[in-house]
Image (tube, helix red, strand yellow):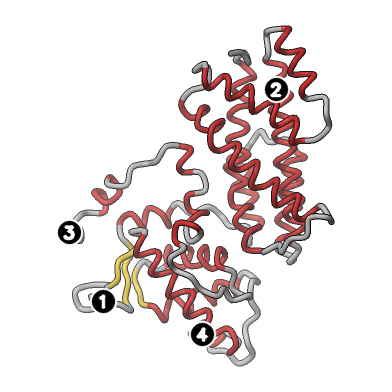
Amino acid sequence: MVLAMTDAALRASCPRKPLAETLGAWQRWGTTETSAVKTEKPMNFPYQQTQALLLEYLRANPTGQYVGVVGGVVALAVSKGLYTAQPGFNPGDGRTMLDRRDRDDVHELVRQLLWQALVKGILVFGMDEHNAHWPFYRLTGYGEHVVENLSPQPYDPTGFMADFNAKNPGAEPVIVDYMTEALRAFNHDCPKAASVMSGAASEKAVLLLCEQFHQAMIDPAKKAQFEKDTERWTISSKYRALKDRLDLMVTAKKLTGDLRDIVSSDLPGCFDLVRRQRNAAGHPELVADHQPDTVFLNLRVMTEYIRRIYLLIDYFRSNAADW
């Protein structure tokens, strides 16, 4: 019955989730909610990057089979400068580009990612009635919708920043500069520097929101108290003072719909995520293993995170901050 559904019906059966639920939905794919599937991640093929490469490959190849996916993912990694092909490889088979030490791990990682895509409803195993089982696959209507709407990835800095600027046309130049530096650092194998730069972009956006919120306050007593509570220079103290008052506006139903979701879920989730990584990278006393895969995941969130902060900034440009 399911296989007989049209693409339109499949898309209709997967309605758009509320704003707070959609933020980072694909960034979370393969982490906590798929922890039942585990693998030793090959160093040369970090999990999140390989997942993004897989989706990019599936966009161009909606049907095929497992060995073709492995070769295609490796070829994409080579074409983007993420992996160095081995001498004497066969241009028609990306698998021959792999170092022998990576072969088993990459094959297994791609196999597990395909199974996770099956669980997510992105594809089914079997290409047609003549090749109806594994190792063949075919995208579902929902899967076609997913891959058609992929955003540029951090390993494509030009495309990523074009998408960032298109979705954040009013972003302060300093935020754009920090993001550009973050991507440059990430793509030159400097994950700690990338975390510091993306953290600086986040902090600048929050500071701008604080300033606009302060300007929008109409009650002199509340405004004076807010000034007192934000006197300290630390971003954490300023953020707490702002967040407490935004929460009061949500409680008073002054912020509803998407803005309520941003305040209740998106803002705290992303601010804490990015800030923890920035602190771990930028404070010598916080010794941490800084995984490039985690940095990649965080960078993917930044475009939408900054956009949602600016939705709040724009709101307070024409509405009072009161509760």
Q: Secondary structure at mark 3?
A: loop
Pick whichever of labels 2 and 1 is earlier in the sequence: 1
Pick whichever of labels 1 and 3 is earlier in the sequence: 3
Which quadrant is home to the C terminus? top right
Residue 265 percent location from the top left of the image? 53, 36
The answer to whether residue 47 is above or below residue 97 is above
Residue 200 percent location from the top left of the image? 76, 44
Q: What's under tag 2, amino acid-wise?
A: Gln
- Mark 2 burial class by Cα count in 10 Å: few <14, some 14-19, many 20+: some
- Of circles 1 and 3, the one toward us is 1
Q: What's under tag 1, amino acid-wise?
A: His
The answer to whether residue 283 is above or below residue 264 is below
Q: Which residue is mark 3?
A: 4
Q: Which residue is mark 1?
A: 133
Mark 3 and mark 2 in contact (Cβ < 8 Å)? Answer: no
Pick whichever of labels 2 and 3 is earlier in the sequence: 3
